[in-house]
Amino acid sequence: MRYLIVSDLHANLEALEAVLEAASGHYDRSVCCGDLVGYGADPNPVCDWVRTQCPIVVRGNHDRASTGMDDLEWFNPVARKAALWTLEELTQQNADYIRALPRGPLSVDGFQVAHGSLHDEDEYVIAAGEAGDAFTYMETRLAFFGHTHVQGGFIWNQSRVETILRVSAKSTDSLLAIDSECGYLINPGSTGQPRDGDPRAAYAIYDSEAKEVTYYRVAYDIPAAQAKIHARGLPQILADRLSVGR
């Protein structure tokens, strides 16, 4: 089985469409590690795709915030404004769908799916030390997570934790063979709002038979996504950061 792994879509329809076009014919099922909405200008079209085409989904912190499930006091002003706008914009069907999403982790076909860490959906797993703690909660040798908007992840080789780097800016993909003796925390990166210095939309494909994960980056129409953010009256920084991947 080949799985398309996406995360942190953040209502960026242009980025999602570019990923789906690039991945077409190369996957059998889709998986989303959360944060369907928030920040971007197209919450309903993005949620429509996830709801109808993505059978394996966990919720993210912006999913909770943008559907009235969380107190927004701990959000910064930019994120808060985007969440409140999204709450008003979402259709009832999509809002209800998001509210019903499981918190994760989910177990699927020998791997797990989470938004943050495996024991705390809101925890950022950025450094090897944080990953070392997260590995202790794994029920399988492989887990996919998001939340950080940084493509890559971590490998536990039974003696230490190694960091997996994102796809090079000079390339479009990077293959990782899965060793059954090691543990893996895989972050596909953010499709809708990368923050690892590469503005291209990020995703991954996991082949459960070949035991391989391939990381991908794909260019998309950033000006179109920015124009929509401007037109919706969302904060300027949400458009600006798409150009730099920060």
Image: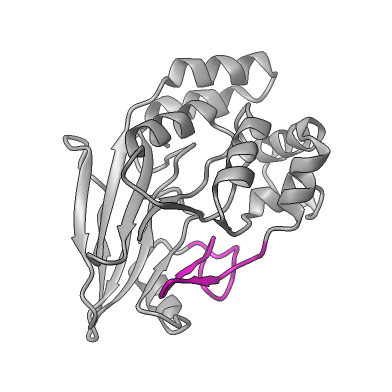
Residue depicted at 43% across the width and 71% down the height: 109
Q: Quadrant of residue 172?
A: top left
Residue depicted at 22% across the width and 86% down the height: 159
Residue depicted at 21% across the width and 60% down the height: 176
Residue 206 in the image, given as x and y percentages of width and height: 32, 58
**Secondary structure character of the magenta stretch overall:** loop
Q: Quadrant of residue 175?
A: bottom left
215, 27: nearer the viewer: 27
Q: Is residue 182 magenta?
A: no
Please count the marks in the image: 0
Residue 17 in the image, given as x and y percentages of width and height: 46, 30
The reply, left or right, for residue 221 in relation to residue 184 is right
Q: In which quadrant of the rendered image does the C terminus lie?
A: top left
Q: Quadrant of residue 163?
A: bottom left
The reply, left or right, for residue 185 in relation to residue 78 is left
Residue 9 in the image, given as x and y percentages of width and height: 53, 41
**Residue segment shown in magenta:** 102-124
The reply, left or right, for residue 81 in relation to residue 155 is right
155 up-or-down from 181: above or below: above
Residue depicted at 62% across the width and 16% down the height: 230
